[in-house]
Image (tube, rainbow, N blue to C red):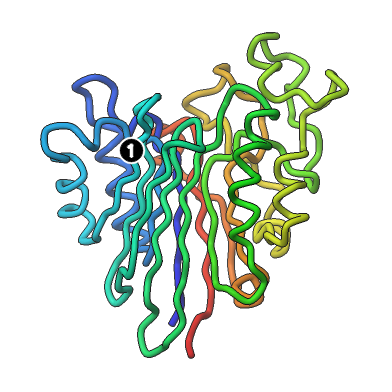
Amino acid sequence: MKLKALTYNTLFGGRDGNEDRRALAQIELVNELRPNVFLMQEAKAFDLNGSAWLFETERRLGMRGFLAPAPRTGQHVAIFIREPLRPISFDADGANFHHALATLKVALPNSDRVLTLLSAHLCPNGPAVRRREAAYLAVQAAPNAWSLLTGDFNSASPHDLEPVGFDELALHHRARYLADDLKTADRSVLGHLEAAGWVDVGHALGGNDAPTVPTTGFVGTAFATMRCDYVLASPALAAHASSYRVIRTPLTDMASDHYPVMASFEVSP
């Protein structure tokens, strides 16, 4: 089986007030790509009105959704899965994260192997907070487990060049990404996660030269040009990684301020 995983910070769930043009574009994209797993960040308001938007998204995608509420920010995270993946357990952590962490364990078809999926959105306010959040993620990288951690880490990678335009950011935005030297972009969050065993699939497969922010439609906002959305795999799962790409199309140019990222794994027993 080829497992296709898509991670996407959708910017307020693709909705701007009552305007759902971006949300419809995002749904069109997911239906075109048909991932087995869709790990979503900023599922804003998906809990309102009896989780109406969650259920409507399930219906439109033909996938089953699991929502981790973010009690302080309302920027929930979610995981959607497609058959034949079968859910075993789900956990939402809104206590140890600025937003939230969604953790879903699924059974792979024709196998006794369990795959752990994690959708994360780390704090935008500074590396000190993100390092604390990363400590809760580090322990999930057991080498023999099959685990996949994706999301918006609001962080530069130790494998990447200095973000383009970093020195040109407004100071209050630049401060959110500053390293301890107060000059360069912080890389310690991803560094700590890799030190714990997480494998940066984009770097491992040679795709880490493609930035994920900002999209063409959201240039001049809070971002330098950089990779801040990642697909991380435990060592056992990373050995089965077969493809990685940042999805850059006219649709994704306008659908969010982040580009979605897709990775594939050969997980046949």
| 245 over 128 or under it: above or below | below
**What residue type is disc 1 on?**
Pro
Residue 126 coordinates in the image, percent (x, y): 66, 24
Asked where in the image residue 143 lies, by quadrant, the reply is bottom right
Q: Residue at x 15, y 54 (%)?
A: 59
Q: Residue at x 30, y 46 (%)?
A: 67
Residue lying furthest top in this view?
171
Does 147 sit left or right of 80 as displayed? right
Asked where in the image residue 212 lies, by quadrant, the reply is top right
Residue 177 coordinates in the image, percent (x, y): 70, 25
Q: Quadrant of the N terminus?
A: bottom left
Who is closer to the viewer here, 75 or 10? 75
Who is closer to the viewer here, 182 or 5? 182
Residue 193 coordinates in the image, percent (x, y): 70, 51
Residue denoted by label 1: 69
Asked where in the image residue 176 lies, by quadrant, the reply is top right
Who is closer to the viewer here, 33 or 88? 88
Residue 228 coordinates in the image, percent (x, y): 62, 39
Residue lying furthest front in this view?
95
| 15 over 47 or under it: above or below | above
Q: Residue at x 65, y 10 (%)?
A: 172
Does 180 sit left or right of 249 as displayed? right
Q: Residue at x 36, y 84 (%)?
A: 109
Who is closer to the viewer here, 154 or 132? 132
- As helix, strand or loop, the secondary structure at mark 1 comes to loop
Near mark 1 (Cα within 10 A), the count class, few <14, some 14-19 or many ≥20, is many
